[in-house]
Image (spheres, rainbow, N blue to C red):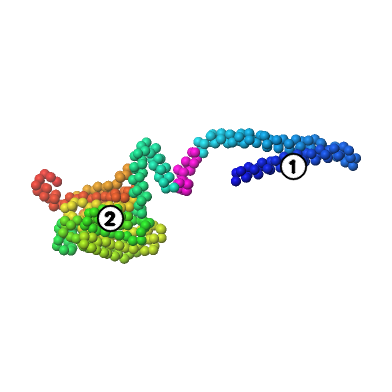
Amino acid sequence: MPDLLHQLYRTKLRLAGLVTAIAGIGLLFAAQAVATTSTLSWLVAWPTNQLGTTLLSAGVIAVIFEYYARKESEALAAERFRAVIRQEAPAIRDAVLDSFAFDPTALKNIASPETLDRIAANALGLRLEDQALAQDVYADVRNQIIGAPERWHDVNVSVDLAPWTAGPTTGRGSMFVATLRWEYRVTPANSTMRFACVSDLAEYRDLLRDQATTSAWYFGQSSGLDAASRDAFELVQLAVNGKERTIRRTQRQGAQLYTAGLGTTAMSGEPVTVAYTYRVLVQRHGHLLYLDLPRPTKGLKVQFNYSEAGIRRVNTLDFIASSQQSRVEHSPEAVPARSVDIGFDGWIFPRSGVAFVWVLEEEMRGATAADPHRT
């Protein structure tokens, strides 16, 4: 196409020169006829001869220029263009980079995922002044965030801890029953939510890596209870946008699985509010309850209530890698309700979480009896 346009330009230039020269020759013949023909004497005052000479000269010069000066003219134009590009290159570069920086869509439209990965890692390397560190950091972030099927927003968790008095005699007095209610906004990636409780540690670790599993609990066999028992774990309620969903349960030796379909509304591609409640048994003398966040999460609030659990004091540990600090608030000593609130407003990576560690009243009484000066 460029060669065709170039040939068309040259042809038009030659044709214009030829037409101009022919017009000049015609005017010269007309001037000669005026001088010899009496009927055309009224044209003597017209500058026909001069005009013809001018047009003939212009046409001939145009043809000569096209033949002999075309290459030099094109070379001169190309050199001028290169000079302009060199002068304006910094401004053009800055304009392009600013466009990509302020409009990510422009960069997305021209770059493949692999190219975007290289751009991000290189930019981070320049900022950190350590390319190897940047490569590792970006690879970790990419695998955790980009590989996650969902992202949770505004997660609210309430935990009520109380002595376990129901069920068989086995385990009574050595267990707490923890009732946990989760609520958050999410654009679901799967049409079904899955909750599992297993006694095999290897299976539990596999479930933690399974993106189709919403929540997994490990219930060891040291308690004398089977992980397949409803006493060990039970999903009691699940709702999507306030509408209850049917829960199905299957079990086998050492494991149980709960599933609930989210319905067509949840699969419309729009964010929905998911809320579910489950109960799980926790060892009293284990002194620990850990809440895991399996998805990237923006905004977390956890309330841990232990008024009836016979606990003297609760400490909190947040396993959240961030420059921001989480907020921890303990209920005042003057009020009967005993609770701890944890809040975090930023993004939380998967496999992060918060842990509650407690000291029992009976342990403090025993320690005080052994050492009266200890409080």
Looking at the image, residue 257 lies above or below residue 333: below
Q: CA distance from mark 2 to mark 1?
A: 86 Å
Residue 243 magenta-drawn?
Answer: no
Dot 1 corresponds to which residue? 19
Span of residues in magenta:
93-111
Looking at the image, residue 301 lies above or below residue 46: below
Residue at 48% over, 43% down: 99
| Extreme residue in the left direction | 370
Q: Secondary structure at mark 2?
A: helix
Q: Residues within 10 Å of mark 1 (few under 14, many from 20)?
A: some
Q: Residues within 10 Å of mark 2 (few under 14, many from 20)?
A: many
Q: Secondary structure at mark 1?
A: helix
Residue 213 position, x and y percent, is: 30, 57
| Extreme residue in the right direction | 38
The numbered disc on residue 207 is 2
Res 278 quadrant in image: bottom left
Residue 94 magenta-drawn?
Answer: yes
Residue 234 position, x and y percent, is: 24, 61
Say what amino acid the circle numbered 2 marks: Leu
- Residue 125 lies left or right of residue 215; in this view the side is right
Q: Using the image as rendered, state which of residue 298 and residue 334 is in the foreground.
A: 298
